[in-house]
Image (tube, helix red, strand yellow):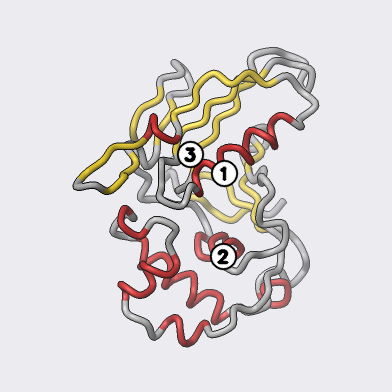
Amino acid sequence: MNMVTRVQELAMGYPSGRLELHLIGGFSDPHNYSEELFYNLLHAFHKQPVEIDLILACVGELNTTVRSGIHWPILYGVGINVKTGEIFPATFPDKGPEQSLRAARHLTGGQQVNIILDVYDCNLGLLRIGPFNYDPLRGVDLWLEQPDDFILQHLSTSPEVEPPHFVMQVRATLKYIQDHPFPAVTVFRDNRPHYFRRDEHTGMWTPFRY
């Protein structure tokens, strides 16, 4: 289960300013994947050269409810009012640009997949994807032939509690990997990142030349 991280700068003079950290997500899953992820995130922030204060941690048991003996996350996602600081439950039908490409990096165990990626420049208002490469996924044709339940059981860390769109997204990612086994060649031809900017009127992400 994913975790949502929010780091808010409260003082001028970054990187010497004070930062507040909010961690929301992850639950008490049977394999303790969320617990390992939580510790990895804390370790990554602890290594930063700036002072970071952990203000909120809604993770693990605090984000877990039990239904019919199965552990479920209470929150799958949150929204933040940047003007007031209010945090509220939210869902996001728009997953951002090039979702299958971004998911392919993780599904294939792409290079540096375990590092924390800084993909959005708030000063420029730009979202950056890549460039990166991943190893071809062996048997991708066979995976695409499998029924939905098989994909759910074998490609999810918590199949009992996945949202309804999970398998559809995985299939789209597998098809992308099938079409682009070497993204460094077919996707990032000039070895340049893909930049996107959000349109102020439509709210859609549009390609941007930077």
Camera-side mark, 3 or 2: 2
Query: With 134 as the anchor, is 190 left or right in this view?
Result: right
Nearer to the camera, 141 or 58: 58
For the point 59% across and 51% down, which residue is it? 196
Query: With 101 as the anchor, is 184 left or right in this view?
Result: right
Which numbered disc flags the more N-terminal residue, 3 or 2? 2
Cα gap from disc 3 to disc 2, whole angstroms: 24 Å
Camera-side mark, 2 or 1: 1
Q: Could you tell me which secondary element the residue under label 2 belongs to?
A: helix
Which numbered disc flags the more N-terminal residue, 2 or 1? 1
Cα gap from disc 2 to disc 1, whole angstroms: 22 Å
Cα gap from disc 1 to disc 3, whole angstroms: 34 Å
- Looking at the rendered structure, the kind of residue marked 3 is Glu
Q: Which residue is mark 2?
A: 101
Nearer to the camera, 174 or 36: 36
* Badge 1 density bin: few <14, some 14–19, many ≥20, Cα 10 Å: some
Camera-side mark, 1 or 3: 1
Q: Which residue is mark 3?
A: 200
Q: Which residue is mark 1?
A: 37
**Res 75 → quadrant:** top left
- Looking at the rendered structure, the kind of residue marked 2 is Leu
For the point 35% across and 50% down, which residue is it? 93
Question: Residue 123: horizontal and vertical position, in percent?
Answer: 67, 32
- Looking at the rendered structure, the kind of residue marked 1 is Leu
**Label of residue 170 in the image:** none
* Badge 2 density bin: few <14, some 14–19, many ≥20, Cα 10 Å: many
For the point 75% across and 61% down, which residue is it? 192
